[in-house]
């Protein structure tokens, strides 16, 4: 009930005060600007119930082709949300064929805990249909988000490492189906980092927790695993970018697009309400609107 009420409020507020990128065009423009400044990106649709999966497929293919025409393949990859595509292997393969043709990777985002197993099975099916997760030159083709708050992630990470899948290491937003299947996100993050260090071709450390990111990066730097700091567009990034320079690792920006980004922002507000008076909270919300507006209006 509360979730549905929040959705209705967010949709009505969004009509009066939009948050960008609200559609594919704005998102691709942001990725284009980032690319011209030498910053890698990934793009993903924050879908809602009722969205047309065929439209999402077409938008991802268009984004892949556009970025391939302007930048080297390692500057961009696609992030897909399997639930939005109905866990349909043919839908995902259509997107993957385009991206792989363009030399770009395809990343499987994390969602609800109950979606973790079908997402993993879908990834396995894609690997069977389209070939190994890595090319002969070592460039990755498939990636998977691993939430550190789930106990199952330890075995999921082990499978990904064994099969050469690139990992995006995240804390995770969605609770496990049963409290017994949860673990402390911070401790789990470092436990997964220790398990994966030197065992995967590349890992994205996707957290805005500076202390945690530094500890994980330090651990991975001792191995031959390639590292990127992956940051969500619109969130405060100054400390994380400074960390990337200090640690000499690259950054990549996740650019989400949707007309429900205001709903996502409201969810973050409710989740982090206890942080309202901490430094950086006001910056987060003011920065989100102003940064996107400046970049999109400058196109």
Image (spheres, rainbow, N blue to C red):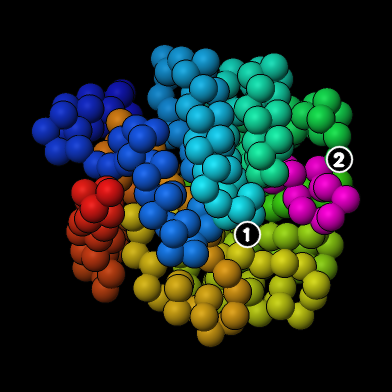
Residue 135 among magenta residues: yes
Is 186 contained in the magenta span? no
Quarter of the view holding residue 218: bottom right
Q: Which mark is residue 132?
A: 2
Would residue 122 appear left or right of 232 to someone viewing this image? Answer: right
- The rendered magenta stretch, by its main secondary structure, is classed as loop
Give the left or right position of residue 112, taking residue 196 as reference.
left
Question: Where does the magenta region start and end?
Answer: 133-143
| Residue at the (73%, 60%) spot, across then down | 202
- The answer for how far apart the CA atoms under marks 2 and 1 are is 20 Å
Residue that appears at 21% across and 49% down: 297
Answer left or right for 80 relative to 274.
Answer: right
Q: Nearer the viewer, residue 172 or 51?
A: 51
Q: Position of residue 225 (x, y in %)?
A: 77, 68
Q: Which residue is mark 1?
A: 204
Q: From this viewpoint, which residue is outermost toward the front?
A: 69
Q: Residue at x 66, y 67 (%)?
A: 227
Which comes before the other along the chain, label 2 or label 1?
A: 2
Categorize mark 2 by other alpha carbons within 10 Å: few (<14), some (14-19), many (20+).
some
Residue 112 pos. (x, y %): 55, 34
The location of residue 269, given as percent across then percent down, is 28, 50
Q: Residue at x 66, y 22 (%)?
A: 94
Q: Quadrant of the N terminus?
A: top left
Is label 1 in a helix, a strand or a loop? strand
Is residue 155 visible in the rendered structure shown here? no
């Amino acid at each position: 009930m509360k979730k549905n009420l929040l959705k209705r409020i967010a949709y009505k507020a969004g009509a009066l005060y939009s948050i960008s990128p609200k559609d594919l065009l704005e998102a691709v423009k942001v990725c284009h600007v980032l690319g011209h400044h030498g910053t890698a990106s990934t793009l993903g649709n924050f879908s809602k119930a009722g969205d047309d999966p065929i439209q999402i497929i077409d938008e991802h293919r268009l984004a892949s082709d556009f970025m391939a025409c302007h930048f080297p393949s390692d500057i961009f990859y696609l992030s897909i949300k399997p639930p939005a595509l109905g866990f349909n292997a043919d839908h995902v393969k259509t997107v993957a064929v385009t991206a792989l043709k363009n030399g770009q990777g395809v990343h499987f985002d994390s969602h609800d805990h109950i979606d973790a197993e079908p997402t993993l099975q879908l990834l396995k099916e894609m690997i069977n249909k389209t070939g190994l997760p890595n090319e002969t030159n070592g460039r990755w083709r498939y990636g998977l988000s691993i939430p550190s708050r789930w106990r199952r992630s330890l075995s999921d990470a082990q499978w990904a490492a064994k099969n050469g899948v690139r990992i995006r290491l995240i804390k995770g937003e969605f609770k496990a189906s049963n409290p017994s299947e949860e673990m402390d996100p911070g401790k789990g993050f470092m436990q997964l980092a220790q398990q994966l260090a030197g065992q995967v071709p590349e890992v994205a450390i996707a957290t805005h927790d500076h202390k945690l990111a530094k500890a994980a990066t330090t651990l991975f730097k001792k191995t031959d695993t390639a590292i990127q700091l992956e940051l969500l567009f619109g969130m405060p990034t100054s400390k994380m970018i400074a960390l990337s320079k200090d640690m000499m690792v690259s950054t990549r920006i996740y650019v989400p697009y949707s007309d429900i980004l205001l709903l996502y922002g409201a969810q973050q507000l409710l989740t982090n309400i206890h942080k309202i008076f901490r430094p950086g909270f006001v910056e987060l919300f003011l920065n989100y609107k102003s940064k996107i507006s400046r970049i999109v209006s400058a196109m």
